[in-house]
Image (cartoon, rainbow, N blue to C red):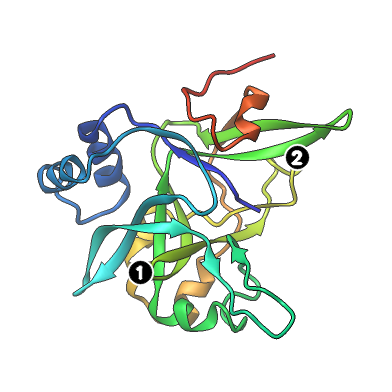
Amino acid sequence: MCGRLSLSAPNHRAAAVLLADAVPGFEVEGLSQWLARSDYRPRYNVGPSQDHWVVRARGGRAILDRGTFGLRSEARPGKPSKLVINARAETVATTPLFRASFVRGRCLIPADGFFEWERRDGQRQPWWFHRDDGKALLFAAVLEPPGFSIITVPAGPQLRGIHERMPAIIEADAVTDWLGGDPPRAHELLRTTDLALASMQVSPRFNSLTHDAAIEQIG
């Protein structure tokens, strides 16, 4: 699964450069101004039910918007609704909760890293994964405003010893096909990445969503 992520560029100008590099078609100046108007701040530990940035299609181009992490399932007799933060790539196009948004609401979640947890002596040890070259990660997601769910794929070798799933990562040259392509073509993009990912152990304080401080390696 993917339940926590970060976008920790230190200011709105740095975030604009990061996103413009990752998403073709963004103009850095305009993007920077948008981020500034929206009171950008670095986030080190974004989780379910919290707001985050969303890149979606409108009028044939990519735009930056805001969304809430998690789609709310429909309540049924005797069963309350629940917050669903992930969709599996294998079933996202057919699962009732996601299939409509997979057709009309595909989006990207920009980040510079994500967290997974290792079970160790009965404790949960968080690891932070990020691109080896420091560039942005774009997670495939489905959006049903205001909520979004991140799509997961089988974990690559960098994660396999910690978790069996990881976010589906869309690379820059596939952004147009993901946001605006036909559903079969978009579905082909949901595969385990071969990007070089680095990882590091971080403080167990990241187990709590209340901890939103700079990420530092431990151990």
Mark 1 is on which residue type? Answer: Leu
Identify which residue is drawn at 46% across, 50% down. Answer: 50
Going by the picture, which residue comes out furthest to the right? 121
Residue 200 figure quarter: top right
Q: Mark 1 = which residue?
A: 179
Q: Position of residue 195 (x, y in %)?
A: 53, 44
Q: Residue at x 60, y 30 (%)?
A: 206
With respect to residue 166, does 62 lie above or below?
below
Q: Residue furthest top?
A: 219
Is residue 201 visible to us here? no
Residue 211 placement (x, y as % from top left): 54, 29
Q: Is residue 37 left or right of residue 74?
A: left
Residue sitting nearer the eye, 46 or 89: 46
Mark 2: which secondary structure? loop
Mark 1 packing: few (<14 Cα in 10 Å), some, or many (20+)? many
3 vs 180: above or below: above
Q: Are marks 1 and 2 in contact (CB under 8 Å)?
A: no
Residue extending furthest toward the front: 78
Residue at 36% over, 32% down: 42
For the C terminus, the quadrant is: top right
Instruction: Say whether residue 180 is left or right of residue 189.
Output: left
Q: Which residue is mark 2?
A: 162
Kind of element beneath mark 1: helix
Q: From where the camera sits, is residue 175 visible?
A: yes
The answer to which of marks 1 and 2 sits earlier in the sequence is 2
Q: Determine the CA span between mark 1 and mark 2.
A: 30 Å
* Residue beneath the point at 62% across and 81% down: 95
**Placement of 156 over or under 68, stated as above or below:** above
Where residue 194 appears, x then y in whole percent?
A: 57, 48
